[in-house]
Image (tube, rainbow, N blue to C red):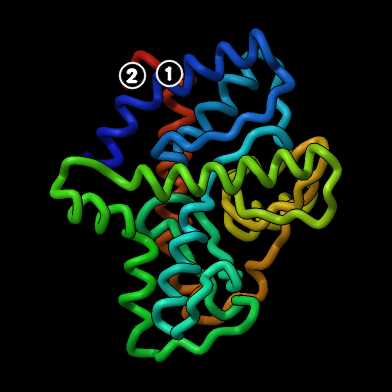
């Protein structure tokens, strides 16, 4: 199933679910994990805007799976037995080339052999395809997605309860979040996944790490931004002009 197939199925589902949220629970935290996240988050935002209840700090696209894969695959390459000890930032979106791992900003720092970089990047970007192939087309990355969803939701709940210093990546509406304007200006996009500082009211701050990437990562950001532009526009158009889809 392609991302276009997913869009045809999930776009209407997300629209209708968020319509219900807007009516019955407008202050809810909305964590969108339905693919294609690059389009379904803008769909959710447009619905909430149309109902005049949009709060950017309470809408999140769950991109944690990309970080989980980056941590796991990098750990395999460098011989780290506990992937959770690594922090590998992943920015952009949540499909293919829009997924950009930033190995240069890993904490602790990691040394990846240069000949392994292309394959590692591809595996992080297209890890879902690897799972589908392994299942011979009978399923997708359901277990890892469930874990990623739990991990992000747990962090949101902990932040709601007052725990400090929680930062998790998320695909968010940048203009509505502190720190987001500079990222929106740098990318030319209103939506982008970056590390987000979480608090009791949701997203407190979008953390701009793009200015610190190296030259090879800057090259990866070019197709990421180009791809995201179309994905975002597709989601917005679905809500604004439903009869044209």
Residue 210, given in percent of the width and then of the height, sits at 63, 67
Q: Is residue 109 above or below residue 4?
A: below
Q: Please name whichever residue, 163 or 184, is drawn nearer the observer in this view of the structure.
A: 163
The outermost residue toward the left is 136
Q: Residues within 10 Å of mark 2 (few under 14, many from 20)?
A: few
Please tell me which residue is depicted at 56% across the width and 70% down the height of the picture. Answer: 88
Please tell me which residue is depicted at 38% across the width and 60% down the height of the picture. Answer: 97
Image mark for residue 241: 1
Please tell me which residue is depicted at 18% across the width and 54% down the height of the picture. Answer: 133
The outermost residue toward the top is 23
In which quadrant of the rendered image does the C terminus lie?
Answer: top left
Kindly identify which residue carries mark 2.
244
Q: Residues within 10 Å of mark 1 (few under 14, many from 20)?
A: few
In which quadrant of the rendered image does the N terminus lie?
Answer: top left
Element under disc 1: loop
Q: Could you give the CA–CA distance between mark 2 and mark 1, rounded to whole angstroms? A: 6 Å
Image mark for residue 77: none
Q: Residue 212 appears in which quarter of the rendering?
A: bottom right
Q: Residue 166 appears in which quarter of the rendering?
A: bottom right
């Amino acid at each position: 199933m392609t991302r276009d197939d997913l869009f045809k199925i999930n776009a209407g589902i997300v629209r209708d679910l968020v319509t219900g949220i807007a009516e019955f629970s407008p202050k809810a935290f909305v964590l969108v994990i339905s693919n294609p996240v690059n389009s379904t988050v803008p769909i959710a935002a447009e619905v909430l805007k149309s109902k005049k209840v949009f709060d950017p700090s309470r809408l999140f696209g769950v991109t944690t799976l990309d970080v989980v894969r980056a941590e796991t695959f990098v750990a395999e390459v460098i011989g780290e037995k506990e992937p959770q000890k690594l922090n590998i930032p992943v920015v952009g979106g949540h499909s293919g080339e829009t997924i950009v791992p930033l190995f240069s900003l890993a904490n602790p720092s990691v040394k990846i052999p240069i000949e392994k970089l292309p394959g590692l990047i591809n595996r992080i970007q297209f890890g879902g395809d690897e799972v589908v192939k392994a299942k011979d087309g009978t399923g997708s990355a359901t277990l890892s997605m469930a874990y990623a969803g739990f991990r992000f939701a747990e962090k949101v709940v902990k932040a709601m309860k007052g725990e400090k210093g929680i930062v998790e990546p998320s695909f968010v509406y940048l203009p509505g979040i502190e720190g987001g304007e500079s990222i929106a200006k740098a990318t030319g996009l209103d939506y982008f996944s970056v590390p987000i500082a979480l608090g009791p009211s949701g997203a407190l701050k979008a953390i701009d790490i793009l200015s610190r990437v190296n030259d090879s990562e800057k090259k990866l950001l070019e197709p990421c931004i180009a791809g995201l532009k179309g994905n975002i526009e597709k989601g917005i158009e679905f809500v604004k002009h439903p009869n044209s889809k």
